[in-house]
Each structure stands twice: as C-alpha cells, then as structure tokens.
Image (spheres, rainbow, N blue to C red):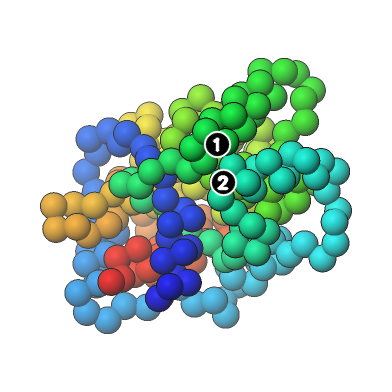
C-alpha cells in the first residue's frame, strides 16, 4: 500500500478542468472500487516495456548538472524516478518543487524559447531526469504544451511514451477535448475517480498499450483503491 501511494503522489498535479462529463464507461469501471478490482498487472507487456525504457545501466547522459537540478526540484532520487508509472494523474494535488521548482521551470521556459537549446530528453539527462522534467512541467499550460512538442519531436527513444501520453491528455482536457488515453482523472461527488470524456473509448486500451500504460480498468482500480 505504501509503495502504491508513493506512485500515486508522484503522478499528482494541479489542473483547471473544463466542465466535461465523466466518461460513462470508465466511470462504471471506476466504481468497482466498492468491491473487488484488479490492480495493474506488473507481469504484463506494459510493465516490461516501462522497465526496459526506464533502466539506466550506466551514466549515458550528457548533462549531469541539469539532471541533478531536475531531480532535486521534483523531489526525486533516481530510484523513485525510475519506478513503474501507474498511468494516471489526479486533479486535486499540489504542484511539485516550491522555489527550486519555479527556478527550474523558468530555465525550461527559456530553453523552449531558444532555438537549438538542449531539452531534457533521455540522452541529455537520463530516463530519471526526463521523468523529473515531466513532473515539473505539469500544471503550467505554456510549459505543458511546449514540452509535449519537444518530447514528441525527440521521438520514443528519447522521450518516455507514458509521460508524453499523459501530457497529451492534459492538454486535450484543458482545451475542452476528449482524452485519448484516459489518464487525467477527476472525482465525482462520491469521490470516485474517472477520466473525463474519452474519444473512441472502446479502443482506449489499445492506445494505452502503445504508450506503455496498464489497462484503463486496472489503472482506475489503483486510483480508487483505499
């Protein structure tokens, strides 16, 4: 339970969510918290793919000082940054980093505005540093949009597909659009977490599989489990 809570807290952040109804199919799955439900199965392909991407067998990144600053500002060490990701973010949590986070976010904005500047992808700051950068951009609309673009441009070998998918969902929710992966969760009046409207909901798990995410029903079980 303690480990699961650490994973959940690492994924949380603030977001102003437009008034879009909760996805009915996903909400029905989420209410399974009142009975038995299946937590993400870490023996499946999504977990194996995440482990393969997150492994850091050697110091193979080029900017150690930036990596250190990102991890410090995000309140992470390499081990926690490289833990498996449950595949969702929650609305009702605080942004990370404090003053240190604000300073690093300012640096990231400067890099976004400067053509040719180094962006914190895997080869630059390692897998742990890239995830720390992801945590720091959450909740800042300008950074989320710019970071998503830079991560996508770098490609899947350089940018963790799970984090990129969650950024994409957040931007779509902010713009009043349906999610693709169902990773941005909000609570209803009963406190049940479910994603806002999903586009093409029957195929959401196929898209999640491509982003190294557990099945949506299992992710909702993790989010709602007491």
Q: Position of residue 64 (x, y in %)?
A: 80, 45
Q: Secondary structure at mark 1?
A: helix
User: For the point 59% across and 42% down, which residue is it?
Assistant: 73
Above or below for 90 versus 138 = below
Residue count near mark 2 (Cα–Cα under 10 Å), binned few <14, some 14–19, many ≥20: many
Residues 214 and 63: in front is: 63
Q: Secondary structure at mark 2?
A: helix
Residue 165 is left or right of residue 219, and the answer is right
Contact between labelled residues 2 and 1, with CB atoms less than 8 Å apart: yes
Give the residue at mark 1: 101
Quadrant (top left/top right/bottom left/bottom right) for the N terminus: bottom left
Above or below for 61 versus 224 = above
Q: Position of residue 143 (x, y in %)?
A: 54, 29
Separation of marks 1 and 2 at Cα, in angstroms: 7 Å
Q: Quadrant of residue 222?
A: bottom left
Above or below for 216 versus 116 = below
Give the residue at mark 2: 74
Residues 71 and 22: in front is: 71
Q: Is residue 23 visible?
A: no
User: For the point 65% across and 64% down, which residue is it?
Assistant: 79
Residue 30 numbered mark, or none = none
């Amino acid at each position: 339970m303690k480990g699961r809570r650490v994973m959940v807290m690492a994924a949380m952040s603030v977001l102003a969510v437009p008034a879009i109804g909760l996805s009915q199919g996903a909400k029905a799955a989420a209410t399974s918290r009142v009975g038995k439900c299946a937590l993400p199965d870490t023996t499946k392909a999504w977990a194996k793919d995440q482990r393969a991407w997150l492994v850091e067998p050697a110091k193979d990144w080029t900017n150690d000082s930036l990596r250190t600053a990102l991890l410090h500002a995000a309140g992470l060490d390499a081990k926690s940054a490289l833990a498996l990701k449950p595949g969702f973010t929650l609305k009702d949590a605080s942004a990370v980093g404090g003053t240190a986070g604000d300073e690093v976010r300012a640096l990231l904005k400067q890099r976004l505005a400067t053509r040719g500047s180094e962006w914190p992808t895997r080869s630059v700051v390692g897998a742990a540093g890239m995830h720390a950068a992801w945590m720091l951009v959450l909740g800042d609309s300008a950074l989320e949009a710019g970071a998503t673009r830079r991560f996508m441009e770098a490609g899947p070998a350089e940018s963790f597909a799970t984090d990129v998918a969650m950024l994409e969902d957040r931007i779509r929710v902010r713009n009043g659009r349906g999610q693709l992966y169902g990773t941005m969760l909000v609570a209803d009046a009963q406190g049940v977490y479910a994603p806002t409207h999903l586009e093409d909901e029957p195929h959401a798990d196929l898209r999640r599989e491509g982003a190294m995410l557990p099945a949506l029903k299992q992710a909702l079980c993790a989010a709602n489990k007491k």
